[in-house]
Amino acid sequence: MTQRILVTGGAGFIGSAVIRYLINHSHHQVACLDKLSYAGNMDSLDPVADSVRYGFYHVDICDACSLDRVFSDFRPTIVMHLAAESHVDRSIDGPAQFIHTNIVGTYTLLESARRYWSTLEPRYQKAFRFHHISTDEVFGDLGGTDDLFSETTSYDPSSPYSASKASSDHLVRAWYRTYGLPVIVTNCSNNYGAYHFPEKLIPHMILNALSGKPLPVYGDGSQIRDWLYVEDHARALVMVATEGKIGETYNIGGHNEKKNLEVVETICDLLQEIVPPGNYPHLKWASASEVKHYRELITFVKDRPGHDVRYAIDASKIQRELGWVPRESFESGIRKTVQWYLDNPRWWQRVLSGEYQLGRLGEQA
């Protein structure tokens, strides 16, 4: 059955991966809804922008009137809600925007979806789905144990970001329990891959290394994360949105636990293999001293407040019920990611210069 899928935050890292996957691997109609904040990048949608099955709405999820117009115009059968402020350091420096977008925005979107859903004929009401995409950070810190986050793990968020996402998760489940809005929730581990905004750990380390700048690692780098290749995640999200059970939660993880320091060292070793220090033509080498190996650029800095030690996902439910497993190991995924940044300087150069924000705008493409 062909669906009409509305993807909020579709110009972001994960959202754009979902849209590229939908256009390239399905027959569904897709609309991207994004306010194009600093993390929204229309360049990431260039590969599918000319598809007749793709459309774009320049709308803020906190704008109820505009949301109502989008629902009336596009008439989605599925909403995939990815729009969110997501950078932990930014949430520590300025939590207000995270409260506004992640909590108020999710509430506003839920209400707009509920108004639209209530007007549908019963058979279309039954088929409608609101898929809320969240994070494993809502569960807090696993510490040094061998435990895994399951779908029933209690929430214990540590940062303003994770607290705002936890709040949005609770709102979504309340709208299901109270109003009967058909919802599904997913919580994922750390994503990485192509088109990742350069402030995030992996692209930040790649670009700093290529320019001979310090590679700042919080604390001693012993924090452990489960790394999920973004294209594996996109495939899982579409599977959940179209095949998942209403009212259920699915954890999505990469089965790739790595210490932050290990991740940075792996990036250094891959770059060392592919392009020796000072030899990448698209970035000026800034190191003041001779550097023979990228690992020499690693610099340990003061840990950030409330930094969780370990996250790890138990993804057995989605494997058991929907048959999803990640296709990429960390070793294969990180190699593809490093190579993509080496091969696509125009994309990240436009981000670093700010030119990407001068891209295409408009109500609908």
Image (cartoon, helix red, strand yellow):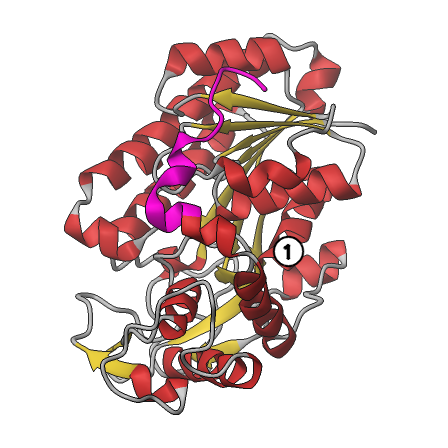
Q: Of 320 and 192, which appears nearest the observer?
A: 192
Vertical relation: 353 (above or below) 289: above
Residue 189 magenta-drawn? Answer: no
Q: Quadrant of the N terminus?
A: top right
Measuring 33% from the left and 76% from the top, which residue is drawn there?
Answer: 212
Measuring 35% from the left and 34% from the top, which residue is drawn there?
Answer: 37
Q: Quadrant of residue 255?
A: bottom right
Measuring 27% from the left and 78% from the top, which residue is drawn there?
Answer: 287
**Drawn side of residue 197 relative to residue 129, left or right:** left
Query: Can you name the residue that lies furthest to the right here?
Result: 1
Q: Of 184 and 291, which appears nearest the observer?
A: 291
**Drawn side of residue 59 relative to residue 341, left or right:** left
* Residue 109 drawn at (x, y percent): 44, 24
Q: Quadrant of residue 285?
A: bottom left
- Residue 249 visible at all: yes
Vertical relation: 219 (above or below) 175: below
Disc 1 marks which residue?
231
Q: Which residues are magenta?
A: 350-365
* Residue 149 drawn at (x, y percent): 47, 66
Residue 361 magenta-drawn? Answer: yes
